[in-house]
Amino acid sequence: MHFQGKAHKFGDDVNTDYIISGKYKFKTLDMKELAKHVMEDLEPGFYQKVAPGDFIVAGSNFGCGSSREQAPLAIKYAGVGAVLARSFARIFYRNAINTGLPVVECDTAQIEAGDELSIDLEAGVINNRSKGTVIPVKPLPAVMIKILKDGGLAPHFRKHGGFNFD
């Protein structure tokens, strides 16, 4: 799984209400509409700034707060290729994988806003093309890579009739 895009940098403890405000997530189930408001409390106009495949890059504890799946879905529907963070709230991490949003645990201190990145999840590396550096990635288990390749847990189950570990 390969991704390329520009880094959009955020700090520590980005909670799910910052990702998609409660004032929107209870008004509609239309993910395309919710995506227009992703990250706007932290960076107004983020949706207009992010290009398909770009990355959200954050510090520790990304996705803390509520366990609703709207947060990773809004990020995915905004066109974000993956979220990179030093650590994730566990429920957000699982929801992201289950909805088909790649999440990457790594040292994000070396990444600045605007850096051009390429990621190879299977090789476990991020290339910061702006700086000419390589950042190792905490590897994902093979089953999670397979779930992501299938577009999330529900599409994976439809395709394989359950978990497929081969």
Image (tube, helix red, strand yellow):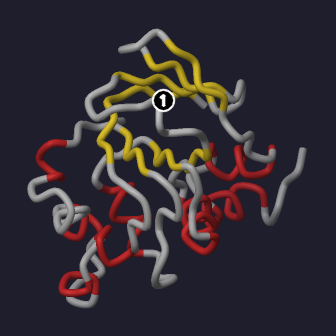
Please provide percent x and percent y for residue 86: 56, 49
Against 31, is 123 above or below? above
Quadrant where the C terminus is found in the figure: top right
Query: Badge 1 is on which residue?
Result: 3
Please provide percent x and percent y for residue 46: 17, 52
Q: State the residue at coordinates (57%, 62%).
A: 88
Furthest residue toward right: 166
Please provide percent x and percent y for residue 163: 82, 61
Is 110 displayed left or right of 55 in the figure? right
Is 121 displayed left or right of 114 in the figure? right
Q: State the residue at coordinates (35%, 28%).
A: 5
Which of these two is toward me, 91 or 109? 109
Q: State the residue at coordinates (23%, 70%).
A: 34
Quarter of the image for residue 162 reads bottom right
Q: Which element is circle 1 on?
A: strand
Q: State the residue at coordinates (20%, 88%).
A: 27
- Amino acid type at circle 1 is Phe
Against 29, is 150 above or below? above
Which of these two is toward me, 37 or 113? 113
Please provide percent x and percent y for residue 154: 62, 66
Is 95 displayed left or right of 37 in the figure? right
